[in-house]
Each structure stands twice: as structure tokens, then as C-alpha cells.
Image (cartoon, rainbow, N blue to C red):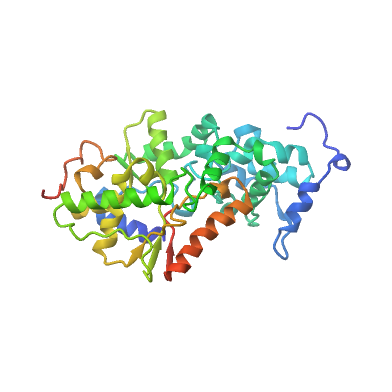
């Protein structure tokens, strides 16, 4: 599963643009968005928990972080806001459609200025 | 560190008894080496003055009061990294779940409880309380707009309750409720690969906060509603997007 997803991501963004984080796969750390944490009211604790994931993302130097699910997306997006980082948080579907040239103009909410106009489908 | 020695004879140990009841055959909580590999790799270590090893030790020592009142159980996401790292594969998240369930329902975190209650309000199972007819309206509205305004997508489909579809797809409520345009990319991908899929008018919502609330009965209700709709439509594969 982890390798299948890496195949997809590399196919979409190009091998040279893929940066794996460390540790990865089953040794990776949870971002802290799941299990109800986002809705639990323990916000400071959620940021303290997520600092590990945040540091992992920053260590990659990547401009975009792909999140696999909604909880992860919400948490990783919020971590960037809270710790004032510049990386963008995207769903995989956004990058798949972008690479295929079928991502519509209103479907680019989570893309940064560098990709906002890239591969725009013909009107 | 404890301020004073823990007197085992004075600890009730009722929680430990409950934990032992759900252990699989041959399971034994005494297998814990107290090595701390779980705590070393847990992002929740140190929150609420707790960590996985300490929590497990408290369960074993019969310290019910501490185990069943620590808010730490709501700061563990159940990611299961501790099990992965544990040389004895002890399922600490299952104990955390049991501890969550030991809280009176009305004292569990309001946000999680509210999301579960919203899911029980109608057949959607949506933590944001989106009703089936509202979901259907949003899907049809967004679909029509894509077909009308995006070249090449005049035949895009986003079926609801399509009988006999291969895949039953659920959907997080966040898109229909707050960012409907984000629904579209996945539809396009499914369309391009020729997938025969459908949403359900019932049980379409993918999230399940009743599980996070450790409310077993409600968790089952939400899950069952969705699975039954999938079965009712005769779909072969249930695709969980969460």
C-alpha cells in the first residue's frame, strides 16, 4: 500500500520532485488529526502532538505536503498556520487531476501561487 | 514519579478486569517488558503527564481512578504506532478506547459528542448534520455546473443510489457542507478510469465520530446504516475514503 501510493505520487509529480519524509511508512508518526483529536477541545495539546509531524515536514524542505485523509489534511494545514510555515497541504486527487490537465479553475483552493495557473484546462 | 509508594491492595482493579475480558486467547498484559519503546515513539508522550507505558502500568496496577479520569485518552489518536513498535505487540490503543468508554457520555469531549449526535440525527451519518436531501441537492447542483461550464465533461456522472454499481463510495461531509468544488476532482478520476460507482442516499458520510466517542451502539448504528445501503444497492465493493 505504501509503495503503491509512492508509485502514484511519483508518477504525478515526477520522480525528481518527490521527497520522502523520515522516518516513513510504518515507522512514521501520526499527525495528530485523527481519533477525534480535532474535535476534542484540547487544542494546545494537539499542536504539541503535531509538532513532531510539523518538524518532519519542514525537514523535507518540500513546498507541498500530500495528506491522505480529511483529518490529516485539516491538522497538517492547521499546523502550517499555527507554526507559521509556508508549505501547502493538498489532497492527492488535486495533484492527480492537475497532472492530467483536468483540474478546473474552482478546484485549486489548496494550490499555491506557483501552481494556481499551471495546466489549466481549455475553456 | 509517584510521590509515595502505590499500595496495590488498595487499588480497585476493576478496569484491569474489564481489560482482561477483551484480551484475545493467550493474551496477557503482563507481557509488557516496561521497555518504554511505546512511549519513546508516541507523539502523545508527556501530554497530560501521561504516556503509553505509564498508562499500561496504571492499568496493570489497578489504578482505576487515574486510568478512567485522565484526559490523555482523548489525546491519543489510536494511531497504533505503539503496537507496531512493541516487542510484545500489546494493544494499548484498545485500552485507551476502553478508558474513553468508561467516561459518562455527557462528560466526554463536547465536540466529539456533538459530531456523533449530529450523525444520529438522520440517515446520512454525517458529523456535520447534512441531511440526505441536502447532500443530494449539492451533488446534483455541482455536477450540473461542471457539465455546463467545463469543456469535455458534459457526460460526467456522480450517481446516488445507482443499483448494482461495482463500488459504493462514501464521502467526508466537509466537501458537501463547506467546499463543494472539492468534490469534483475525485468524480473526474473515477470517470476517467471508467469506474462504475455510486454514493448512497443513506449512510453516505464517511466519518464516524461515534467511534471516536467510544459509543459502541451509535458507532454500530452509523456503520450499519451505510453498509446496509451498500448491500441494498447490490454493490460489490465498499470504498471508504477516510
Quadrant of the rendered image containing residue B162: bottom left
Camera-nearest residue between B33 and B164? B164
Camera-nearest residue between B201 and B193? B201
- Residue occupying the point 52% across, 50% down: B208
Q: Position of residue A95 (x, y in %)?
A: 27, 50
Q: Position of residue B2 (x, y in %)?
A: 76, 32
- The quadrant the N terminus of chain B occupies is top right
- Residue occupying the point 59% across, 51% down: B218
Q: Position of residue B27 (x, y in %)?
A: 72, 61
Camera-nearest residue between B97 and B118? B118
Decide if residue B45 is on the left or right side of residue B58.
Answer: left
In the displayed image of the protein, which residue is found farthest to the right?
A: B9
Quadrant of the rendered image containing residue B169: bottom left
Figure check: B87 above or below A21: below
Quadrant of the rendered image containing residue B49: top right
Question: Is residue B30 shown to the viewer in this render?
Answer: no
Question: Is residue A44 shown to the viewer in this render?
Answer: yes
- Residue occupying the point 52% across, 29% down: A44
In the displayed image of the protein, which residue is found farthest to the left?
A: A122
- Residue occupying the point 43% across, 45% down: B130
Decide if residue B228 is on the left or right side of residue B236.
Answer: right
Camera-nearest residue between A43 and B129? B129
Figure check: A20 above or below B110: below
Q: How many marks?
A: 0
Figure check: B120 above or below B24: above
Figure check: B230 above or below A88: below
Q: Position of residue B92 (x, y in %)?
A: 64, 50
Amino acid at each position: 500500500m505504501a509503495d503503491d501510493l509512492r508509485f502514484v505520487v511519483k508518477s504525478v509529480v515526477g520522480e525528481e520532485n518527490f521527497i520522502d519524509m523520515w522516518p516513513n511508512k510504518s515507522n512514521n508518526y501520526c499527525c495528530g488529526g485523527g481519533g477525534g483529536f480535532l474535535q476534542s477541545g484540547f487544542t494546545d495539546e494537539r499542536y504539541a502532538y503535531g509538532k513532531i509531524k510539523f518538524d518532519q515536514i519542514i525537514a523535507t524542505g518540500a513546498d507541498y505536503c500530500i495528506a491522505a485523509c480529511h483529518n490529516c489534511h485539516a491538522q497538517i494545514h492547521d499546523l502550517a498556520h499555527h507554526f507559521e510555515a509556508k508549505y501547502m497541504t493538498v489532497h492527492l486527487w488535486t495533484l492527480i487531476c492537475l497532472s492530467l490537465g483536468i483540474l478546473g479553475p474552482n478546484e485549486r483552493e489548496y494550490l499555491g501561487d506557483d501552481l494556481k495557473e499551471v495546466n489549466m484546462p481549455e475553456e | 514519579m509517584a510521590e509515595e509508594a502505590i499500595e496495590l491492595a488498595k487499588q480497585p482493579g476493576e478496569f484491569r478486569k474489564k481489560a482482561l475480558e477483551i484480551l484475545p486467547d493467550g493474551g496477557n498484559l503482563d507481557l509488557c517488558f516496561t521497555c518504554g519503546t511505546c512511549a519513546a515513539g508516541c507523539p502523545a508522550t508527556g501530554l497530560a503527564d501521561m504516556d503509553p507505558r505509564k498508562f499500561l502500568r496504571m492499568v496493570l496496577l489497578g489504578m482505576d481512578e487515574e486510568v478512567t479520569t485522565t484526559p490523555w485518552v482523548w489525546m491519543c489518536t489510536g494511531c497504533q504506532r505503539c503496537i507496531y513498535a512493541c516487542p510484545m505487540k500489546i494493544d494499548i490503543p484498545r485500552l485507551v478506547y476502553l478508558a474513553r468508554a468508561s467516561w459518562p457520555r455527557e462528560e466526554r469531549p463536547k465536540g466529539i459528542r456533538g459530531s456523533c449526535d449530529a450523525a444520529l440525527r438522520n440517515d446520512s451519518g454525517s458529523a456535520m448534520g447534512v441531511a440526505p436531501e441536502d447532500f443530494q441537492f449539492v451533488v446534483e447542483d455541482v455536477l450540473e455546473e461542471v457539465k455546463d461550464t467545463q469543456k469535455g465533461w458534459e457526460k460526467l456522472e456522480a450517481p446516488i443510489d445507482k443499483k448494482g454499481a461495482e463500488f459504493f463510495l462514501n464521502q467526508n461531509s466537509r466537501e458537501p457542507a463547506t467546499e463543494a468544488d472539492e468534490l469534483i476532482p475525485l468524480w473526474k478520476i473515477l470517470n476517467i478510469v471508467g469506474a462504475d460507482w455510486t454514493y448512497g442516499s443513506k449512510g453516505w458520510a464517511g466519518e464516524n465520530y461515534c467511534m471516536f466517542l467510544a459509543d459502541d451502539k451509535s458507532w454500530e448504528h452509523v456503520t450499519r446504516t451505510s453498509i446496509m445501503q451498500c448491500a441494498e444497492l447490490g454493490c460489490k465493493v465498499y470504498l471508504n475514503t477516510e
